[in-house]
């Protein structure tokens, strides 16, 4: 494999060409300029081989997922993505071909989302490959989107569809049988390549009362809204938007519904909107050509601290869920 500095010069430096403050990755740090009236929004996510991606996943997809999960966090705050820092701790199986594919994936998504590399670090490890990316975005002066500002009476909305990523992982691990090839491919792609809602997030400023991205499971992340805002949430299971592929999977395996609601890897935006503003949500959905579905509502907390999420069946009865979602610990 190429040496560290040759790798930086040949592979990573071209990714920084669009950022004058990166200095071609030849200095110890980068300089980030903000326009007057802008503030910086910063987030970091890490991914570990065998935990966040499968060893057989293409390196291009690994890179794009790493970038996209961070861009999803920026979107959840209402920020426009600008740049990123990257740290790679490469395991024994990583050679030049894998790394070239990884960089090609970053280059493709840099162009798609308008971001550039600012710098980072690269090293080796005898263990599994570990990747960390810090994304930087910008937001104008004024309130950003928060988890702690949901109010009782607000409608609860989610973008896109839920459950694709979780069932995509199940498909790749051969835990679901009987699906058509097209459905299997769709779900696997949704697991490997989430779609961060980078246009929706900034558009929700001034409309959404609260927001976060759904990464650990719909119910788990809804719980973060309730815990931070001091309200409860009621989610109608039948209202949760599902793709045709997930509906096909549930046709074979109705028992997968809890997995759909709690499995995670959705990277959709979950947000509240005050009553009376439903028409604005519908107009935004049409303008972005993106489904924005009302799935429930915030209600006064039954306990003093709030934090309850009740998922209701079509008769209004709470569903029994063994887990709320993914947790690392």
Image (tube, rainbow, N blue to C red):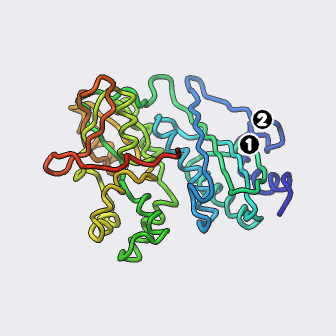
Give x and y (percent) for residue 91.
Answer: 73, 58
- The tag on residue 209 is none
Q: Which corner quadrant of the image does residue 62 belong to?
A: bottom right
Instruction: In the displayed orientation, state which residue is furthest to the left.
Output: 315
User: Dot 1, crowdedness within 10 Å: few (<14), some or many (≥20)?
Assistant: many
Q: Quadrant of the N terminus?
A: bottom right
> Which is nearer the eye, 247 or 84?
247
Q: Which residue is mark 1?
A: 119
Q: Which residue is mark 2?
A: 29
Q: Which corner quadrant of the image does residue 147 belong to?
A: top left
**Badge 2 vs badge 1, beta-carbon distance below 8 Å:** yes
Q: For the point 15% across and 46% down, which residue is it? A: 316
Give x and y (percent) for residue 207.
Answer: 34, 32
Which numbered disc, 2 or 1, marks the residue that appears first in the sequence? 2
> How far is mark 2 from mark 1, CA to CA?
7 Å
Secondary structure of residue under mark 2: loop
Q: Which corner quadrant of the image does residue 272 belong to?
A: top left
Q: For the point 56% across and 26% down, which residue is it? A: 38
The number of numbered badges drawn on the structure is: 2
Q: For the point 40% across and 35% down, which residue is it? A: 224
Secondary structure of residue under mark 1: strand
Give x and y (percent) for residue 184.
Answer: 42, 71
Give x and y (percent) for residue 309.
Answer: 30, 39
Seen in the picture, residue 110 relative to 80 is either above or below; the reply is below
């Amino acid at each position: 494999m190429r040496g560290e500095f040759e790798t930086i010069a040949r592979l990573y430096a071209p990714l920084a060409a669009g950022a004058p403050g990166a200095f071609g990755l030849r200095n110890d740090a980068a300089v980030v300029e903000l326009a007057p009236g802008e503030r910086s929004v910063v987030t970091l996510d890490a991914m570990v081989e065998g935990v966040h991606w499968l060893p057989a996943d293409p390196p291009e997809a690994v890179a794009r997922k790493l970038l996209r999960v961070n861009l999803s966090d920026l979107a959840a705050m209402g920020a426009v993505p600008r740049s990123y820092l990257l740290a790679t701790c490469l395991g024994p199986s990583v050679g030049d071909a894998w790394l070239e594919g990884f960089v090609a994936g970053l280059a493709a998504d840099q162009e798609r989302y308008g971001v550039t590399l600012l710098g980072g670090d690269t090293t080796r490890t005898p263990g599994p490959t570990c990747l960390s990316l810090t994304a930087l975005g910008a937001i104008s002066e004024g309130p950003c989107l928060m988890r702690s500002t949901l109010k009782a009476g607000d409608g609860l909305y989610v973008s896109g569809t839920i459950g694709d990523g979780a069932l995509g992982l199940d498909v790749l691990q051969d835990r679901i049988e009987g699906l058509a090839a097209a459905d299997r491919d769709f779900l696997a792609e949704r697991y490997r390549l989430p779609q961060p809602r980078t246009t929706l997030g900034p558009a929700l400023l001034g409309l959404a009362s609260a927001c976060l991205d759904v990464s650990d499971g719909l119910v788990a992340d809804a719980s973060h809204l309730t815990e931070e805002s001091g309200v409860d949430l009621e989610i109608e299971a039948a209202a949760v938007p599902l793709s045709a592929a997930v509906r096909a999977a549930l046709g074979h395996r109705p028992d997968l519904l809890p997995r759909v609601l709690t499995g995670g890897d959705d990277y959709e935006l979950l947000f509240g909107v005050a009553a009376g503003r439903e028409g604005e949500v519908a107009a935004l959905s049409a303008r972005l050509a993106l489904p924005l579905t009302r799935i429930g509502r915030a209600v006064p907390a039954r306990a003093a601290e709030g934090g309850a999420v009740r998922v209701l069946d079509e008769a209004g009865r709470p569903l029994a869920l063994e887990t709320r979602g993914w947790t690392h610990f």
